[in-house]
Amino acid sequence: MITTRDIAVRLELSVSTVGRALADDPRISQETKSRVRQTASEMGYVANRAARMMRGASSNVVGLVIPDIRNGFYSTIAHELSRNMETDGRQLILSETADDRMRELRHLTELSASRVAGVIIVPTARPHPDSVRLFSRLPHVQLLRRHPSLGAQWFGIDDFQVLQEATAHLVALGHARIGYIGGPRALPTGAERLRGFHSALREAGLPEETGTTRLGKPSSVTFGRQATRRLLDTADPPTALVAGSVQLTLGVLEELDSRGVAVPQELSVVGFGDEPGFSWWGPGLTTVRLPVKQMATDCALWLLNRLTTNPLDDTAHTSVSPGSLVVRGSTAPPRATPRRS
């Protein structure tokens, strides 16, 4: 491996001069810096970042900690964040928690030990106290989910608004028995989406029991299928369903396909997120479209500015992006005789 000593021998300079030139030290002339960089490039020199970090320098790496990259929602976010980091000469590194707070702690410990420049995190429902302590000395921002123990910098969507709008759409079509499949109340996103669902029912003057809920792991397609099955197998099944996450939506659609349910003739469906296949699923899925790309870009630019100006500034910052309902063919007025499984 080529070292600074090899470059120094080639140019007949001291090792310290070569090191300072590569570090853009103002004490070294531009002419010498150019010679050193050109020679380093020709010889295939790669900087020893680990050694630099041992001397107190941080890396150009930014960590992204998310529950599940298989979720198209998170993969889109990861892509947009990576693109923005690359533009600024930084690299994004990915960690998955599966919504397990101990895995979250292990990832954060490694990221901190690697002296990452900052972290973007979709936190678990109850971060470990040691995770909270790590964050106190690590530049970070929360994305989508917000936990008060991790600071007051957050970029998210209006979870209440999107579920209220989705449910109100079904109510306006005449549905009085609506099922909701969503994440647990322990997650701030889950709690807000559930609140939006119930709010739409109350505003329509419908009793709360007309809205049947099944709450579970939001990143589980399997739970989406199981919850759909349980709702449709009740004595008085709903005439419409609303899903509260992308993965749960996929589970709902898989179960409806396997049972041969005619949508929207037998059951109206509103999904969450607008995955590429949703527009051509069945009659076209009515769904909540989320401003994922814009939110990720805004989050990245905010963090990059913070890393440049004042990395440990803990001034509160909140950005809430609204979603929108895309109406397609999967929703219609309920038929006169409700379907029973």
Image: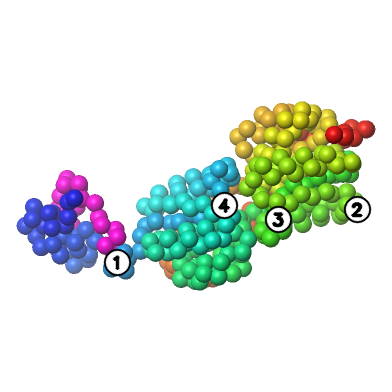
In this rendering, is residue 207 above or below 339?
A: below
Residue at image mark 4? 98
Classify mark 4: helix, strand or loop. loop
Q: First in sequence: mark 3 or mark 2?
A: 3
Q: First in sequence: mark 2 or mark 1?
A: 1
Q: Residue at x 57, y 52 (%)?
A: 98
Indicate the position of residue 64 as horizontal and vertical percent values: 49, 54
How far separated are the C-alphas under marks 4 and 2? Answer: 36 Å
**Residue 29 lies in what quarter of the image?**
bottom left
Q: Amino acid at mark 1?
A: Met
Residue at image mark 1? 54
For residue 134, side relative to residue 277 (left or right): left
**Label annotation for residue 15:** none
| Local crowd size for mark 2, using a 10 Å CA cut-off: few (<14), some (14–19), many (≥20) | few
Q: First in sequence: mark 4 or mark 2?
A: 4
**Label annotation for residue 207:** 2
CB within 8 Å, label 4 to label 2? no
How far separated are the C-alphas under marks 4 and 3? Answer: 15 Å
Q: Amino acid at mark 2?
A: Pro
| Local crowd size for mark 4, using a 10 Å CA cut-off: few (<14), some (14–19), many (≥20) | some
How far separated are the C-alphas under marks 1 and 3? Answer: 43 Å
Indicate the position of residue 332 as horizontal and vertical percent values: 82, 34
**Residue 21 lies in what quarter of the image?**
bottom left
CB within 8 Å, label 1 to label 3? no
| Local crowd size for mark 3, using a 10 Å CA cut-off: few (<14), some (14–19), many (≥20) | some
For residue 119, side relative to residue 285 (left or right): left
Q: Amino acid at mark 3?
A: Pro
Q: Residue at x 28, y 68 (%)?
A: 55
CB within 8 Å, label 2 to label 1? no
Q: Residue at x 88, y 49 (%)?
A: 210
Classify mark 3: helix, strand or loop. loop
Residue at image mark 3? 184
